Image (cartoon, grey):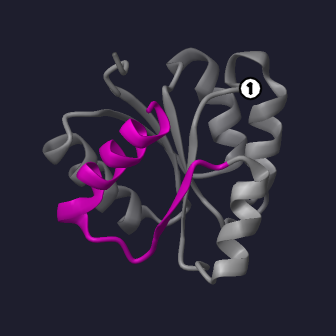
């Protein structure tokens, strides 16, 4: 039996995208979403929030998605927490590179807000198969 996905930590530096994603994930998916504007903020918030899934933007000022992922993976409680990247950089070579870093999937930006929650759920279930 797959654990029900409840807590998602979303790291995204664009306030407009944060707002749309939060609405999509909370209203349509029923998830509890914590939003961080940077990798640094995510590293501070994650231990207290205990997310079951990380959604990470790839391109952010300062610490980008891959760097954030690397630091999260170094923390024992997040060594195996699934991560999905959300990015406009979705050429096959780029996606292959992300998967080598250990992400379970990539959601292309711009994403469809009406389908974001179901897409996240589908990835979650496939990951736990």
The answer to whether residue 122 is magenta is yes
Image position, residue 45 (x, y; %): 59, 28
| Residue 64 seen in the figure | yes
Rendered image quadrant of residue 59: bottom right
**Residue 78 as seen in the image, left or right of residue 116:** right
**Residue 60 as seen in the image, left or right of residue 110:** right
User: In percent of the image, x 64 and y 80: which residue is there?
Assistant: 92
For disc 1, the neighbor class at 10 Å (few under 14, some 14 to 19, many from 20) is: few
On-image quarter of the C terminus: top left
For mark 1, what is the residue? 79
Rendered image quadrant of residue 46: top right
Q: Residue furthest front?
A: 129
Front one among 123 and 129: 129
Image position, residue 103 (x, y; %): 64, 49
**Residue 18 as seen in the image, left or right of residue 79:** left
Front one among 62 and 10: 10
User: In percent of the image, x 70 and y 33: which residue is there?
Assistant: 43
User: Looking at the picture, does residue 58 appear above or below residue 9?
Assistant: below
Q: Residue furthest bottom?
A: 91
User: In percent of the image, x 73 and y 42: which residue is there?
Assistant: 40
User: Looking at the picture, does residue 117 appear above or below residue 107?
Assistant: above
| Residue 59 seen in the figure | no
Q: Report the magenta residues as a range.
A: 103-129
Image position, residue 28 (x, y; %): 15, 47
Image position, residue 78 (x, y; %): 68, 25
Label 1's element?
Answer: loop
């Amino acid at each position: 039996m797959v654990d029900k996905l409840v807590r998602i930590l979303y790291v995204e530096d664009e306030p407009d995208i944060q707002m749309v994603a939060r609405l999509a994930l909370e209203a349509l998916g029923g998830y509890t979403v914590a939003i961080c504007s940077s990798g640094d903020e995510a590293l501070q918030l994650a231990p207290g929030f205990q997310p079951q899934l990380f959604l990470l933007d790839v391109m952010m000022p300062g610490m980008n998605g891959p760097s954030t992922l690397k630091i999260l993976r170094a923390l024992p409680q997040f060594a195996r927490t699934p991560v999905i990247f959300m990015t406009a950089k979705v050429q096959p070579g780029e996606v292959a590179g992300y998967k080598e870093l250990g992400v379970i999937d990539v959601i292309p930006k711009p994403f469809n807000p009406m389908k974001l929650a179901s897409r996240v759920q589908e990835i979650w279930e496939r990951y736990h198969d």
